Image (cartoon, coloured by chain):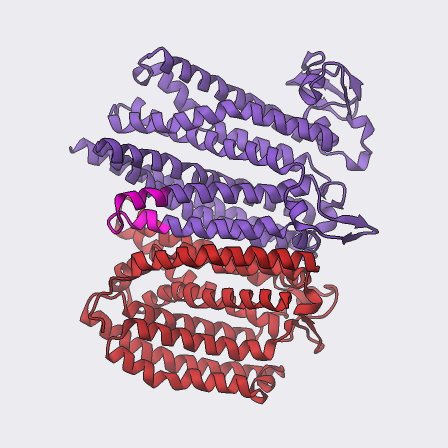
């Protein structure tokens, strides 16, 4: 019971990271396509919340090493390289974003450098995050001690399937960001531009989602088989897709908060579809075996204290987060309902 | 360069770099809250300007501190997975609490930096205070985790197994209070002196404006009080180390031979071959007194520590001497400052005094890094004192030399950029004042 509850909190943490951190990364990606005209809107949207948004990743990590130490050790070993690359991306991105705004001298040369680093590290980081997550459930980590460098530290994550998940996550982040930014943009023109982007990104999401299954099939992995055979996963995927027409309607009608909730629902469904076939495995190995949450979990005393700390955390953090969003997100630019 | 050394250097470098920004993040919100409070009370615009100018610099330091902290939280597992596999379930509690504290801090920071015109002045001031308090709390929690490494508690180590885990006992280990006290004051001492020093430099350059004077005073009051607390908290910590980690004490004091009425060694060069300290000043009985409160007490020397459990003496001893040296200078500057305030001297216009403060700018951070070197190198060869050796915790991944190089390059680039940005911020600030 305790184990399941902790996994639930970790799943929620990852979900919130996908939504909020993803929106953050996505904003950088959107900027890459829309260009300098989006800079101010994006800054106003992200600046007060980006540091808080990314802490969900830390929370998920702490739960992992506290509650599921064996999984954490495998994660840190087999996926050492993509983790390091993601971290470099996070550092570059956070620094570039902050420097761009807080440089007391706003001149073309340095601004251009900050901007390029911010945009490209946004793409890079979320893509690598996708490859990293894919490494855990693709079934490409060799079981047992690391024997061969290439097999253990490279082939475990550096493959087509990983890249396809990376691509999907990148597109999804941009999609989430576009929807959130619709509520922040100040001009009709900006709204129209983003509206077109949302449509394109939706199609791209579906397409890249399909590529994941294709990559799984080409590489002979179990993912596509497990997904197609599971009615909940298939149902969730369909529902997420079918919400699209409703989403487009909400965008046309300028229902800012409803479109955000629907976007959130779509992400929840996608994650649900993935988690359902993943459960209860934390890591899938190349020989078909897996490490389940029960096998990897820490002793009961640790789990109980962890759950207590998480409950305390949730009770403290959510009200504070609510306040943050109230202060910064309650004045919507264009006409709300 | 072999893997273990590369991993040690990478960890040391990441920690040493991050801690500077973490200290600034812990202390500066209180400086800003003080300035904002003075503005709310006196309606003197200079205090509002100061709070806002400081927050522009702090935003940069916070962002860099946050991302470097993210690296560290993963690095524990990347470099020392065997350690984390066993330690994770035991000392996870302070980390979960730290995560909560961070979250509150990041939220409050967002409100503080961007909410000037969005919320009532009182609420804004409170948000600044919350940033500081949660920052200090998260610092205390993470130090408690480090304290556990020095003073393992909350488990039974039986035949290589970690049994009967008690996370609460682990967090409230014997060393956590003294370490937390010493580190918290260190953050204020180092940041206070650094900020005061920067403003003293500005005053020396002829920018004799009230802005810098008030800034210096606020920073220095925090720095001076903390600098006076440091010897006290340091003494508490050292007495604890003398009891629990005699090897660390012996190394930091370069105390080779167990003896009663042990001498305190000041300066000198330790020689492991001959087990002597050349060119040192010795104060008989002083080490026994400091370590155990009794001039005749026995202080365990390195001769009682097995060879393969001895920390590197030279590094630990030099670092300790550096920390004490700079810490003492700061304490004296602090005492002088309070004396001058009491006698109502016009210190703020005295060039020699400004020069002293300006020169002391890096003292706190030098002492800070030296102190961390003492405690981390002094704990070697253990990663969990008496339980797990650092070399047994190392990652199996080869090529750590490359990740060391990568981290080094990225952080060097960031350091240069941050310094460059600070200079630009100060330049623009002066242009603004010059035109008024």
Nearer to the camera, A59 or B280: A59
Nearer to the camera, A104 or B223: B223
Residue at (57% x, 82% y) in the render? A216
- Asked which quadrant contains residue A186, the reply is bottom left
Chain letter, colour purple: B
Q: Is residue B406 visible?
A: no
Residue at (42% x, 23% y) in the render? B359
Residue at (64% x, 18% y) in the render? B267
Q: Position of residue B409 (x, y in %)?
A: 50, 48
Q: Position of residue A249 (x, y in %)?
A: 28, 82
Is B115 part of what is drawn in magenta? Answer: yes
Residue at (44% x, 33% y) in the render? B191
Nearer to the camera, B368 or B293: B293
Q: Where, quadrant-wise, is the C terminus of chain B in this rendering?
A: top left
* Span highlighted in magenta in the image: B110-128
User: From what the image shows, is residue A168 above or below residue A66?
Assistant: below
Q: Is residue B8 visible?
A: yes
Give the side of residue B305 with respect to residue B211, left or right.
right
Q: Position of residue B264 (x, y in %)?
A: 68, 17
- Asked which quadrant contains residue B213, the reply is top left
Give the side of residue B313 with respect to residue B346, left or right.
right
User: From what the image shows, is residue A295 above or below residue A227?
Assistant: above
Tag count: 0
Is B112 part of what is drawn in magenta? Answer: yes
- Asked which quadrant contains residue A51, the reply is bottom left
Q: Position of residue A167 (x, y in %)?
A: 47, 74
Chain letter, colour red: A
């Amino acid at each position: 019971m305790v184990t399941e509850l902790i996994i639930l909190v970790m799943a929620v943490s990852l979900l919130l990271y996908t939504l909020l951190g993803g929106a953050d990364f996505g904003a950088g990606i959107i900027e890459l396509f829309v260009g300098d005209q989006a800079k101010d809107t994006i800054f106003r949207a992200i600046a007060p919340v980006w540091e808080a948004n990314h802490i969900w990743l830390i929370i998920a990590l702490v739960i992992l090493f506290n509650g599921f130490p064996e999984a954490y050790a495998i994660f840190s070993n087999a996926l050492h390289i993509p983790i390091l690359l993601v971290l470099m991306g996070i550092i570059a991105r956070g620094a570039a974003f902050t420097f761009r705004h807080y440089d007391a001298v706003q001149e073309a040369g340095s601004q251009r450098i900050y901007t390029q680093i911010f945009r490209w590290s946004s793409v890079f980081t979320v893509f690598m995050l996708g490859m990293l997550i894919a490494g855990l459930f693709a079934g490409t980590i060799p079981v047992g001690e690391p024997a061969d460098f290439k097999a253990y530290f490279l082939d475990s994550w550096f493959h087509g399937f990983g890249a396809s998940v990376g691509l999907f996550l990148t597109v999804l982040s941009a999609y989430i960001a576009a929807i959130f930014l619709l509520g922040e943009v100040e001009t009709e023109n900006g709204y129209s531009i983003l509206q077109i982007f949302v449509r394109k990104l939706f199609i791209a999401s579906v397409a890249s989602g399909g590529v994941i299954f294709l990559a799984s099939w080409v590489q002979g992995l179990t993912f596509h088989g497990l997904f197609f055979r599971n009615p909940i996963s298939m149902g969730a995927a369909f529902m997420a897709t079918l919400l699209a027409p409703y989403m487009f309607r909400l965008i046309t009608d300028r229902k800012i908060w409803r479109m955000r909730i629907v976007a959130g629902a779509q992400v929840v469904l996608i994650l649900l579809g993935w988690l359902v076939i993943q459960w209860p495995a934390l890591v899938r190995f190349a020989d078909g075996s897996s490490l389940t949450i029960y096998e990897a979990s820490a002793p009961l005393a640790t789990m109980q204290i962890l759950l207590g700390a998480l409950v305390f955390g949730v009770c403290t953090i959510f009200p504070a987060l609510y306040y943050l969003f109230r202060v910064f997100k309650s004045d919507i630019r264009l006409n709300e309902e | 360069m072999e893997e273990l050394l590369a991993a040690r250097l990478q960890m040391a470098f990441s920690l040493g770099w991050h801690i500077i920004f973490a200290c600034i993040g812990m202390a500066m919100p209180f400086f800003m809250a003080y300035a904002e409070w003075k503005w709310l009370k006196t309606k003197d615009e200079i205090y509002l300007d100061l709070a806002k100018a400081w927050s522009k610099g702090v935003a940069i330091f916070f962002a860099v501190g946050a991302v470097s902290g993210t690296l560290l939280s993963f690095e524990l597992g990347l470099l020392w997975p065997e350690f984390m596999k066993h330690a994770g379930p035991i000392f996870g509690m302070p980390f979960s609490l730290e995560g909560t504290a961070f979250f509150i801090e990041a939220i409050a920071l967002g409100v503080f930096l961007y909410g000037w015109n969005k919320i009532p002045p009182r609420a804004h001031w409170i948000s600044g205070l919350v940033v500081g308090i949660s920052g200090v709390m998260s610092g205390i929690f993470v130090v408690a985790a480090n304290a556990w490494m020095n003073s393992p508690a909350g488990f039974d180590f039986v035949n290589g197994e970690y049994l009967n885990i008690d996370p609460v006992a682990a967090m409230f280990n014997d060393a956590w209070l003294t370490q937390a006290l010493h580190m918290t004051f260190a953050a204020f001492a180092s940041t206070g002196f650094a900020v005061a020093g920067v403003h003293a430099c500005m005053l020396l350059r002829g920018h004799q404006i009230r802005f810098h004077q008030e800034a210096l005073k606020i920073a220095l009051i925090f720095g001076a009080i903390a600098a006076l607390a440091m010897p006290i908290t340091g003494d508490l910590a050292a007495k604890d180390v003398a009891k629990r980690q005699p090897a660390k004490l012996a190394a930091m004091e370069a105390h080779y031979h167990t003896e009663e009425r042990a001498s305190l060694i000041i300066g000198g060069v330790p020689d492991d071959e001959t087990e002597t300290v050349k060119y040192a000043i010795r104060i008989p009985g002083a080490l026994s007194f400091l370590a155990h409160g009794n001039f005749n007490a026995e202080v365990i020397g390195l001769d009682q520590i097995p060879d393969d459990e001895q920390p590197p003496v030279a590094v630990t001893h030099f670092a300790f001497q550096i920390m004490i040296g700079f810490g003492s200078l700061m304490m004296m500057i602090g005492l002088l400052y309070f004396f001058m305030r009491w006698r109502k001297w016009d210190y703020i216009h005295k060039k020699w005094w400004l020069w002293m403060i300006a020169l002391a700018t890096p003292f706190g951070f030098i002492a800070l890094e030296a102190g961390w070197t003492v405690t981390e190198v002094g704990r070697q060869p253990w990663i969990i004192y008496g339980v797990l050796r650092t070399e047994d915790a190392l990652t199996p991944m080869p090529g750590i030399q490359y990740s060391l190089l990568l981290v080094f390059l990225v952080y060097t680039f960031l350091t240069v950029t941050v310094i460059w940005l600070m200079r630009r911020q100060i330049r623009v600030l002066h242009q603004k004042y010059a035109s008024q």
